[in-house]
Image (tube, rainbow, N blue to C red):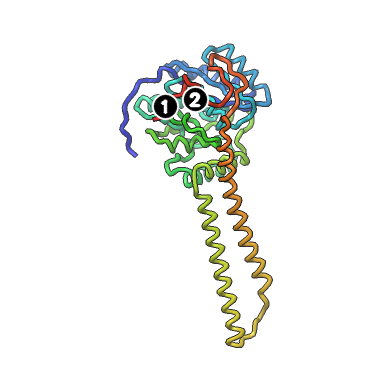
Amino acid sequence: MHYYLVPRKKPNLLSLIIPCYNEEEVLDYLKQRLREVVPKLEVNTEIILVNDGSSDRTILGLMDWAKEDKNVRVISLARNFGHQIAVTAGMDHARGDAVVIMDADLQDPPEVILEMLTRYKEGYDVVYGQRLARSGESFFKKITAWAFYRLMKILVHKDLPLDSGDFRLISRRCLDALNGLRENHRFLRGMNAWIGFPQIPVYYNRDPRVAGETKYPLQKMLKLAMNAAVSFSPLPLRFSLGLGIVVALIGFCVGLYALYRAFQHFILQMPIVYNPGWATIVTLICLIGGSILISIGILGEYVARIFEESKGRPLYVIEFMEGGLAKGGLGIPSRSNRKKSI
């Protein structure tokens, strides 16, 4: 897709949004790395650290960091709401003309932000990091991640970039549009693709975690995949429809075969070599029963999401905020940060 780009200056203020969940071991490395990188950006920068209900001493490290640096702001959520909601909390309270979303584990090098800013000045509203290689990860992790992104491209959106996480720069007008989307079950990568705006990748090699353990094991990856598929696509419902058609065709074929055997026995007086009755019945019952349960389960996932959305609950609850952020306890963008979506 070709965009009409309008060059722009560097943002007057850049917001770095970093969700943190049990990242006590990582914080010193993150602090040192950002102290080296941020001056090179040559823009005013605020760092928004979102504590996502950590059970270790992460919040103490974040508060100490905020006391040392006036540009660091801390949002502490009342419990663990999940990575996508923690990022959303940071987006709601970001004051910059552009924001960068990155994880605390330094697998996505903050030095890439320099190239992102160059693309931002060219007029792009979303500059996302696309991984060329993944260091320090097992073969199983790599192959499941490879399959995840390709499946999501089919299920979520045709423009969803491959091998790209949440590490990205987003302009203010794009951020305002994103903040206007308040669904409970969030898949920010798909939401970015859905809203459009000029987007372009920057390529990099992903580093291993500097410390600690991954916060996206297979279980969470599967949960994210299910959430993205059901939230963005009717394909699972169509799959259940297709499954029902296939089972019906199998039943029809079995019925024709039964008629054919009856014709052989009663009309042509051919002996029946074996008695297929119980095996046929059991097979058909399993096929029909299994397809019905799968279809009901898929439909139930959609109904559950409708139920969650109908409650109208806020996306998150804030325990406290430190560092000059607007006060407020619910997951609703403050008026000072919320603008009309384009």
Secondary structure under tag 1 reads loop
* Viewport quadrant of the C terminus: top left
Rendered position, 96 above or below 239 = above
Residue denoted by label 2: 110
The answer to whether the residues at label 1 and label 2 have Cβ atoms under 8 Å apart is no
**Residue at (67%, 66%) from the top-left corner?**
282
Whether residue 208 appears in this view of the structure is: no
Residue 273 vs residue 207, the one in the foreground? 273
Q: Amino acid at mark 2?
A: Pro
Q: Amino acid at mark 1?
A: Lys
The quarter of the displayed image where residue 96 is located: top left
Question: Which quadrant of the figure contains the N terminus?
Answer: top left
Q: Is residue 311 above or below residue 303?
A: above
Q: Residues within 10 Å of mark 2 (few under 14, many from 20)?
A: some
At mark 2, the secondary structure is: loop
What residue does disc 1 label? 340
